[in-house]
Image (cartoon, rainbow, N blue to C red):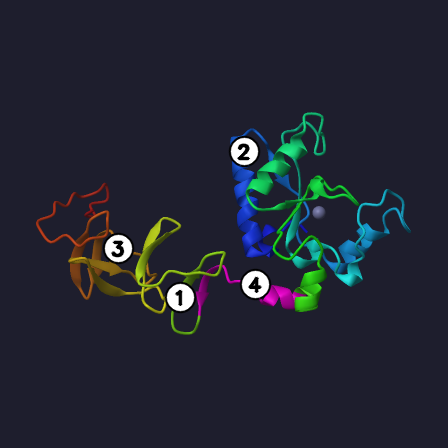
């Protein structure tokens, strides 16, 4: 499966950094296999054993012994049109070095089966031995992953980063909008907030208001930095006559 979203959140972050910095260095990195099901791993294991082809893995599916089954590995290919696995100019080693700088383990460094198009998180060792010992199955391992993104806990919305941390008693800018998170880590919604001697207003979606806002049938104007205008403001009608 090529669904990046199914990978461990920490790996998703490193993968995106790899594609970005690779692009900046003229290395066009494409993403291949990410999470692998038992069936997919068994089909791969059969190759070179009970099916034609050369042996590409030592891991059979039912033993969960591929890191791909644990969501902590992905494969990449070359995306610049010169051939997905063309390596005459050392493309895979260059990307391998880049990934290692980002804290990934590169399959090109392995001895038993050298796997140049492969990266994985190094946190649990090179093989799933430790993961199997600690969690038993990929399913229970995945249930223990840090949350990533917006989560509602029944009271309010918290925004988790990929390491599981979140903002409390501070501002955070997310996808271009500013939010204020209270002491519990909840984005405050539909309320005024007084911060460093200035008033701000957070809308029903938690986003800091800018421009004009009607609240309790009163009109307020907010500067681009979110502070409420406390002195005279100039309003200009737009093409449709509305004031901005
Ligand atoms: Zn792989």
Q: Nearer the viewer, mark 4 or mark 3?
A: 4
Q: Residue at x 64, y 57 (%)?
A: 124
- Give the quarter of the image for residue 9: bottom right
Q: Nearer the viewer, residue 160 or 90?
A: 90
| Position above or below: 227 against 130 | above
The Cα–Cα distance between marks 3 and 1, rounded to whole angstroms, is 18 Å
Q: Position of residue 178 (x, y in %)?
A: 32, 53
The Cα–Cα distance between marks 2 and 1, rounded to whole angstroms, is 35 Å
Q: Which numbered circle lies on residue 39? A: none
- Name the residue carrying label 3: 209
Discs 4, 3 touching: Cβ within 8 Å: no
Under circle 1, the secondary element is strand
Q: Who comes first in sequence, dot 3 or dot 1?
A: 1
Under circle 3, the secondary element is loop
Q: Nearer the viewer, residue 206 or 35?
A: 35
- Name the residue carrying label 4: 145
Q: Residue furthest bottom?
A: 154
- Give the quarter of the image for residue 86: top right
Q: Position of residue 196 (x, y in %)?
A: 18, 57
Q: Residue at x 55, y 47 (%)?
A: 14
- Name the residue carrying label 2: 23
Residue 179 in sight in this render: no
Q: Residue at x 67, y 34 (%)?
A: 92
Q: Nearer the viewer, mark 4 or mark 1?
A: 4
Query: What residue span does the magenta drawing correspond to?
Result: 139-152
Few, some or many residues within 10 Å of mark 1 (<14, 14–19, 20+): many
Residue 219 in sight in this render: yes
The Cα–Cα distance between marks 4 and 1, rounded to whole angstroms, is 19 Å
- Name the residue carrying label 1: 157
């Amino acid at each position: 499966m090529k669904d990046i979203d199914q990978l461990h959140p920490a790996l998703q972050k490193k993968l995106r950094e790899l594609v970005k910095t690779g692009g900046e260095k003229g290395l066009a990195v494409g993403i291949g296999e990410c999470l692998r099901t038992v069936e997919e791993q068994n089909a791969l294991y059969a190759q070179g054993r009970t099916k034609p082809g050369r042996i590409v893995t030592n891991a059979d599916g039912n033993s969960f012994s591929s890191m791909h089954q644990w969501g902590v590995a992905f494969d990449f290919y070359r995306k610049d049109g010169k051939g997905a696995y063309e390596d005459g100019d050392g493309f895979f080693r260059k990307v391998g070095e880049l990934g290692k700088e980002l804290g990934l383990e590169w399959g090109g460094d392995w001895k038993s089966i050298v796997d140049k198009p492969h990266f994985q998180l190094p946190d649990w060792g090179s093989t799933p031995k430790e993961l199997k010992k600690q969690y038993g199955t990929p399913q229970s391992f995945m249930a223990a992953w840090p949350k990533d993104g917006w989560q509602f806990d029944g009271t309010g919305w918290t925004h988790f980063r990929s390491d599981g941390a979140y903002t409390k008693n501070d501002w955070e800018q997310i996808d271009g909008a500013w939010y204020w998170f209270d002491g519990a880590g909840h984005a405050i919604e539909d309320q005024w907030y007084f911060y460093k001697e200035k008033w701000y207003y957070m809308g029903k979606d938690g986003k800091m208001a800018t421009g004009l806002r009607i609240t309790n049938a009163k009109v307020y104007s907010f500067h681009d930095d979110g502070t409420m205008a406390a002195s005279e403001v100039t309003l200009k009608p737009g093409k449709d006559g509305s004031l901005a």
